[in-house]
Image (cartoon, helix red, strand yellow):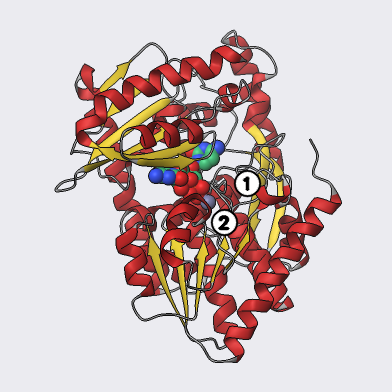
Amino acid sequence: MPIKKEQIHAFINRASEAAEQISKHVEKGELIHVASHFDADGLAAAGIIGRALLRLEATFRLRIEKWIDEKIIRKISADKPPLIIFTDLGSGYLDLLNAKLSGHRAIILDHHEPTEEPSKTFTQVNPHLHEIDGSRDLSGAGVAYFVAKALNKKNVDLACVAVVGALADLQDKYEKKKLGGVNEKIVEDAINAGCLQVDTDLLFFGRETRPIHKALARTTNPFIPGISGEEDKSLAFLANFGITPKREDRWRALRDLSKEEKKKLFSGLSDYLLSKGLPSDVAFNLLGNVYTLTKEESWTPLRDAREFAVLLNATGRMDKQGLGVAICMGDRGVALDQANEVLQEYRRTITKYLGWLNEEPGRIKELDNIYVVHGENYIDENIIGTVSSILSTSLPNPEKPVIAFSIVPGEEMIKISARTLEILTRRGLNLGEIMRNTADKYSGRGGGHNIAAGAQVPLEHLDSFIKSVDHLVQKQLEVT
Ligand code: C5P
Ligand code: C5P
Ligand code: ZN
């Protein structure tokens, strides 16, 4: 259902209320504690609120959290901050926050589904409260952006960071990989602020930084037989169309190709896919909306918003969240160099994990209704989510959700990351609900979106948890 103007107005009014409360605390010079989520959208949200508070010369401190638990709440409330702001976090933990923080003033800027009514001392800004879908129409960074914009019109220059947050949470689910819903308003603001350009173009990942043949070889949607995964063949394919891979000493990226070259490449790929027996419209999956941050330097991973999102994600997952937030707040130079190094390391790590999973047959198990990925204590708990996302688009049966887990050394709880694709959420599958209910049943805690969710459960209940999830997936898909 399209979002009505009234829904957006009601949401923006709520964001303005939150902004007013923040202003009052800032005017009094009171300490504000900001807690944000450690994934890329959370880091973008933290960067937006951080920059907005800096502009107000507020006294604040900012911490990045993987989740909220009692220990974290104790730390946050230790020196009694008069205001706590949660970004990209909070709505999924209302039971805990109500129980432990109801004596505090808190502002929750989130897009996860609220689990219950918040305490009277909390102000919650969340698209779900206005029947706006927080998993595709607005991200955590987007919610933070509307509050920042209400604080100061100048903050419209942060719209680009919110676009990165939405892409990081894979919200480009509209036709041709477009951001829609409330995200569309943010895209408009970013274009008007002069920091964003949106084009329809070839979608190969890495348009600013990856040599074109590598970008082509990495393309798996659609899978191009004989080219996907094969850099040499990809290089030869480009040569057929007179596309030289290098100019002077530099590898050319997709951004360096002329319109003419891209046209030739696209029609060449269409003919090739057809010759391999694929339906004629499949080639159109190669085209879609691309989001260019025009104020960023060319050939850096910050210029293409999807590459920016991956860079941020890498800093979050590799425990270098401060770097990610700094970049969202405007730092470049050394911070960017360091983030680039973190990104390389992150890529090496993921490749290593995927290789390890394929080394032995039992590491990815196919059950009746799900795949179970045994990260054991080999795959880092922070990276299991990324591994789960990658596998959800690459395992043979797209109609089976991926449930991946990592054992956290020295901890009783294991980390579970569940991912599925739209073909199943459209049929009614809601992994967030399944994770929440099953984790509740086995003394853990879970939640998230229909398409991407997670949980922490005690190791001793792992087998029963998996069985139960396998069963619930079947049940949810049966009803529809
Ligand atoms: O906590 P948050 O909502 O920001 O995290 C969403 C997570 O789910 C991200 O890691 C994102 O990559 C993943 N996701 C996904 N597929 C989607 C939407 C989100 O894998 N369609
Ligand atoms: O950790 P992971 O990336 O798998 O999380 C996917 C989504 O599930 C995120 O939006 C995260 O915030 C949410 N989640 C949750 N409760 C948990 C674990 C994850 O709401 N216990
Ligand atoms: Zn988010």
Label 1, ligand 1: CB separation under 8 Å = yes
Q: In this figure, which residue is indicated by the disc labeled 2?
A: 110
Residue 201 image offset from top left, x and y in percent: 68, 40
Residue 42 image offset from top left, x and y in percent: 49, 58
Q: Earlier in the sequence, mark 1 or mark 2?
A: 2
Q: Residue at x 44, y 67 (%)?
A: 101
Q: Residue at x 58, y 48 (%)?
A: 167
Quarter of the rendering occupied by the C terminus: top right
Q: Residue at x 73, y 50 (%)?
A: 130
157 is higher (above) or lower (below) than 367: below
| Left or right: residue 269 compared with residue 344 | right
Where disc 1 sits, the SS reads loop
Q: Quadrant of residue 159?
A: bottom right
Which residue type does callout 1 highlight?
Answer: Gly
Residue nearer the viewer, 30 or 363:
30
Residue nearer the viewer, 106 or 60:
106
Label 2, ligand 3: CB separation under 8 Å = yes
CA separation in Å, label 1 and label 2: 8 Å
Residue 115 image offset from top left, x and y in percent: 53, 47
Q: Residue at x 49, y 81 (%)?
A: 82
186 is higher (above) or lower (below) than 389: below
Residue nearer the viewer, 133 or 255:
133
Q: In this figure, which residue is indicated by the disc labeled 1?
A: 134
Are discs 1 and 2 less than 8 Å apart at CB?
Answer: yes
Where disc 2 sits, the SS reads loop
Quarter of the rendering occupied by the N terminus: top right
Quick one: which residue is furthest to the bottom in this view? 28
Quick one: which residue is furthest to the right in this view? 5
Which residue type does callout 2 highlight?
Answer: Asp
Residue 304 visible from this viewpoint: no
